[in-house]
Image (cartoon, rainbow, N blue to C red):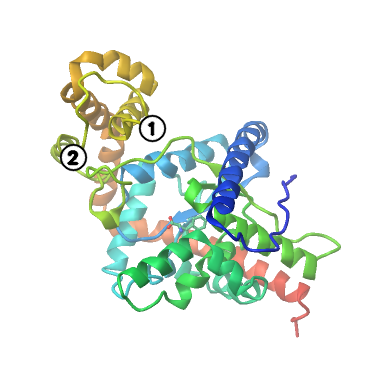
């Protein structure tokens, strides 16, 4: 398949405006590229392999579903091969206490399966069970500079936040995790990564690693693909405090929540003082968020839903959205309960099969890499 090339960054951005401009430009480019890719995928799904995943820090929430999980299921159902990493080593990038990892991994698996991921077609695995994947981190680390890692916006933001909180600095694993993510993607020759816009700089590092590996060790015939980002169609989902929905902020509606908890969540959700409901994402983010969620589950547009509710106001909007979410999640929740009550054996088997498959592929890739690097003795 063809890949777009990005010019190698030679100098770090010197001022904020320049950085903002280049980020905006790359987001716009990624969106344009996504439209082209969607067309190619629909015509030739067999050409693509998706690799994406989640950190097992808790059960998945509505933000996960709308942001990425539903998109993964859609790609799987289009016939694209999907690899899902439960990134357990990423949990220890920024915390000492991992909680009950086996229980959390089971919750994430339940969410995946309930959302429609089919283990017969898709591969689910964990970092810690695939040694050869992790070993790729070593040669990959040699292909990036410390300055490049320091420029990664997530790493930078975490470093600044740690400084503000007067905590010890960021861990070495956090500093290098974008390169670890390159190993996650490249071990299986993933060429399509469905992500939110916040993950674009990480993907740029993956592309850099692939390009430099090819230049250095596989000049005659490129070995790794330069994967493309596939930007999720929907926008950021907000929590009940008006900020981006996130497990760690405690503002999330978990997919496994009950109907009562769902109703209570939307009762708490923020609105604004304007009586008439309109869809204005910039000026009225909280209302726009409710409209987007309602529209998603009723298969309409946020604009149409706004027209429908109109002068009936925020109370009516909340009632409509609650009903839409309760109805929309009913099949997922029923499946989840069924899978959960069937006991842990089935989940353990799904993961064991996924891990075995990932290991087989990772072993082959690492062996190829050893060969290309002249390290086969
Ligand atoms: N960092 C991602 C998250 O926190 C999870 C992840 C790990 C991932 N490895 C990946 C995503 C590789 C895409 C590709 O959600």
Q: Which residue is painted at 29% across and 54% down in the image?
A: 247
| Image location (x, y in percent) of residue 82 | 54, 48
Nearer-the-camera pick, 331 or 273: 273
Q: To which quarter of the image does residue 358 belong?
A: bottom right
> Label 2 crowding class (10 Å Cα cut-off): few <14, some 14-19, many 20+?
some
Q: Which residue is painted at 60% across and 71% down in the image?
A: 147
- Above or below, comparing residue 8 to residue 148 in the picture: above
Residue 50 showing in the rendered view:
no
**C-alpha span from label 2 to label 1:** 23 Å
* 34 sits to left or right of 3: left
> Label 1 crowding class (10 Å Cα cut-off): few <14, some 14-19, many 20+?
few
| Image location (x, y in percent) of residue 371 | 76, 75
If the image is split into quadrants, where does the C terminus sit?
A: bottom right
- Above or below, comparing residue 364 to residue 259 in the picture: below
Residue highlighted by disc 2: 265
* 204 sits to left or right of 311: right
Nearest to N terminus: mark 2 or mark 1: 2
Q: Which residue is painted at 71% across and 51% down in the image?
A: 6
| Image location (x, y in percent) of residue 141 | 61, 74
Residue highlighted by disc 1: 282
SS label for mark 1:
loop
* 237 sits to left or right of 230: left
- Above or below, comparing residue 249 to residue 212 in the picture: above
SS label for mark 2:
helix
């Amino acid at each position: 398949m063809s890949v777009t090339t990005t010019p190698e960054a030679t100098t770090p951005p010197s001022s904020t405006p320049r950085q903002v401009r280049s980020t905006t430009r790359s987001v716009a480019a990624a969106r344009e590229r996504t439209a082209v890719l969607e067309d190619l995928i629909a015509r030739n799904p067999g050409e693509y392999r998706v690799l994406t995943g989640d950190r097992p820090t808790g059960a998945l929430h509505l933000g996960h579903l709308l942001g990425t999980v539903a998109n993964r299921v859609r790609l799987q159902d289009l016939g694209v091969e999907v690899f899902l990493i439960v990134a357990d080593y990423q949990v220890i990038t920024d915390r000492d206490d991992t909680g009950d990892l086996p229980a959390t991994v089971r919750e994430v698996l339940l969410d995946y399966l309930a959302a429609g991921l089919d283990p017969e077609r898709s591969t689910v695995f964990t970092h810690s069970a695939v040694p050869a994947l992790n070993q790729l981190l070593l040669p990959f680390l040699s292909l990036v500079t410390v300055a490049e890692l320091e420029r990664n916006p997530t790493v930078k933001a975490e470093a600044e936040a740690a400084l503000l909180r007067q905590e010890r600095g960021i861990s070495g694993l956090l500093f290098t995790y974008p390169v670890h993510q390159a190993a996650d993607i490249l071990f299986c020759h993933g060429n399509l990564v469905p992500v939110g816009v916040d993950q674009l700089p990480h993907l740029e590092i993956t592309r850099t690693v692939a390009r430099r590996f090819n230049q250095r060790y596989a000049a005659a015939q490129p070995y790794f693909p330069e994967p493309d980002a596939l930007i999720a169609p929907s926008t950021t989902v907000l929590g009940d405090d008006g900020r981006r929905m996130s497990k760690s902020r405690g503002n999330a509606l978990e997919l496994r929540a009950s109907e009562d908890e769902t109703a209570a969540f939307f009762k708490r959700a923020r609105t604004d003082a304007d009586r008439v409901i309109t869809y204005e994402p910039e000026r009225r983010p909280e209302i726009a968020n409710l409209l987007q969620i309602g529209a998603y589950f009723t298969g309409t547009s946020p604009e149409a839903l706004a027209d429908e509710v109109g002068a009936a106001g925020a109370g009516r909007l909340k009632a409509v959205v609650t009903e839409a979410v309760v109805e929309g999640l009913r099949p997922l929740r029923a499946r989840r309960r069924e899978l959960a009550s069937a006991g842990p054996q089935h989940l353990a088997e799904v993961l064991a099969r996924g891990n075995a498959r990932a290991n087989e592929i990772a072993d082959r890739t690492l062996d190829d890499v050893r060969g290309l690097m002249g390290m086969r003795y």
